[in-house]
Image (cartoon, rainbow, N blue to C red):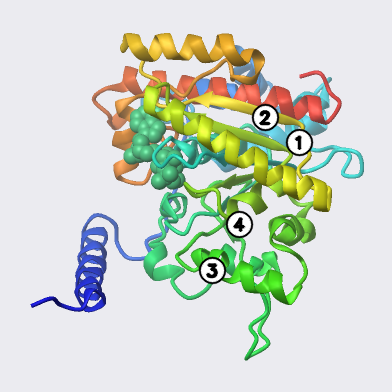
Amino acid sequence: MAEALHEHLTGFASDLTAALKALSESSFAPHEVKTLRSFSAGEASYYLGVGDGYLRKAHHEGRIPDVEMGPGNRRKYTAEQIDQIRHVLAETAKNPNQFRPGRRDLATEDMQVWAFVNFKGGSGKTSTAIHTAHALSLRGYKVLVADCDPQASLTTFFGYQPEIDFFDSGSLYDAIRYRDQETGEGPKPITDIIRKTYFPNLDLVPGGIQVAEFEHETPSALSRGELPVFFDKIRDCLKPVRDEYDIVILDCPPQLGYVTLSAICAARNILMTIIPERVDMASAAQFLNMASSLTEVLHENAGVGLFDNFRFLLSRYDTSVATQVDLASFLKDLFGDAVMKAPFLKSSAVSEAGISQQTVLEVDLTEVKNRKTYERAIHSVHEIVEEMETMIQANWGRSA
Ligand SMILES: Nc1ncnc2c1ncn2[C@@H]1O[C@H](COP(=O)(O)OP(=O)(O)OP(=O)(O)O)[C@@H](O)[C@H]1O
Ligand SMILES: [Mg+2]
């Protein structure tokens, strides 16, 4: 005899939630605060944008605070120390702007909002968003990363369990929600939602299952004429913090719904991740068609949908697969400069680090067996970030 589907599904859901909780408690103590490893002198120099000998000399001359020595008498830098050194250098160096990569004039240099999109699931949006957010914050930009996906995978990278921690509140949803018709409860200021993270210069707007409510509630809010309308929601909610951050990264869900459209309308920079595989390219064409007709309607009716940069990013790109190499060059021939020069290379380091909710930048390289693999993946992330920085600096009217 047929059973009621909902009861069946509830059983699976509660079993899975309990099992996941037990699993994460065994590998990661509940609510254990994630911490960040320390960085080598080479890494610190890279993030500060100076040559190899620079830091050694600056320490020797007592121009910057000293740091702890690790094994082999090598200096070890925490991310906070890298940041502190950047501030000291910005006060004392001959060319202080070299150490002030972020906004210097809040009136003329806008906060740069980036949306990472594609409705193809698993195309690398979250991995690219979290890796670039980590790297940009280490490079000295003040970054806010917002998880716009009800699946909230990005939020897990910060040590949260969104299905427990942000099940009923505390996610992006609270900042973009519509007014409740019965209780009158409306959106909360984004400042109540933003959480500091264990990366200096990096804050988080968590995601959570409630974000899916926004999709269901938008049609009736539209028919009631409630303002702001969905496409203004993310842009509006960010207004109170527009002097706080240099860069905002919006990790979108794998669908072209109201949240994604709101993110696209909030962003002046759009990065579409695309795996160079035949099926992914076909789906990308569909996404572009749909996005084009939807944003046309929004543009004509509300004047929204302007942008500074739109880029395709080749993601999970495996250069050892001939068909991927062919498709990558096909895309570059077709779209020219709209394709980022740097791809996000497929790497077992990215997936391996991802299992413990880490980016390749966080993993302690002294503890991995395949260090070279990690270094290649880190290099790939750095190349993407350098290209983004060039666009950001250009948007601020600076030549990088
Ligand atoms: N460069 C890479 N190398 C190896 N694995 C990768 C890489 N980028 C992403 N992955 C893996 O691919 C899977 C999907 O990636 P990710 O979650 O970033 O995609 P997504 O587009 O955000 O997915 P969704 O649409 O579900 O949000 C993850 O398991 C991730 O670890
Ligand atoms: Mg994702």
Spatial CA span between label 1 and label 4 = 18 Å
Q: Residue at x 68, y 87 (%)?
A: 184
In the rendered view, does 91 fall on the left or right side of 348?
Answer: right
Residue 204 versus residue 335 in the image, above or below: below
* Picture disc at residue 307: 1
Mark nearer the viewer, 3 or 2: 3
Mark nearer the viewer, 1 or 4: 4
Quarter-wise, where is residue 204 in the image? bottom right
Assign a secondary structure to mark 3.
helix
Q: Where does the N terminus fall, quadrant-wise?
A: bottom left
Q: Earlier in the sequence, mark 1 or mark 3?
A: 3
Spatial CA span between label 4 and label 2 = 20 Å
Q: Where does the C terminus fall, quadrant-wise?
A: top right
Assign a secondary structure to mark 2.
strand
Residue 4 versus residue 256 in the image, above or below: below
Q: Residue at x 57, y 8 (%)?
A: 333
Q: Earlier in the sequence, mark 1 or mark 4?
A: 4
Query: Which residue was labeled with disc 3?
Result: 216
Q: Neighbour class for label 1 at 10 Å: few (<14), some, many (≥20)?
A: few
Of 192 and 125, which appears nearest the observer?
Answer: 125
Q: Where is residue 274 in the image (x, y as percent from the top left)?
A: 48, 28
Query: Which residue was labeled with disc 2?
Result: 310
Spatial CA span between label 3 and label 2 = 29 Å
Q: Residue at x 50, y 11 (%)?
A: 330
Residue 36 visible, this angle: no
Mark nearer the viewer, 1 or 3: 3
Q: Earlier in the sequence, mark 3 or mark 2?
A: 3
Query: Which residue was labeled with disc 4?
Result: 258
Q: Do the residues labelled 1 and 3 touch (CB within 8 Å)?
A: no
In the rendered view, does 391 fall on the left or right side of 129?
Answer: right
Mark 1: which amino acid? Phe
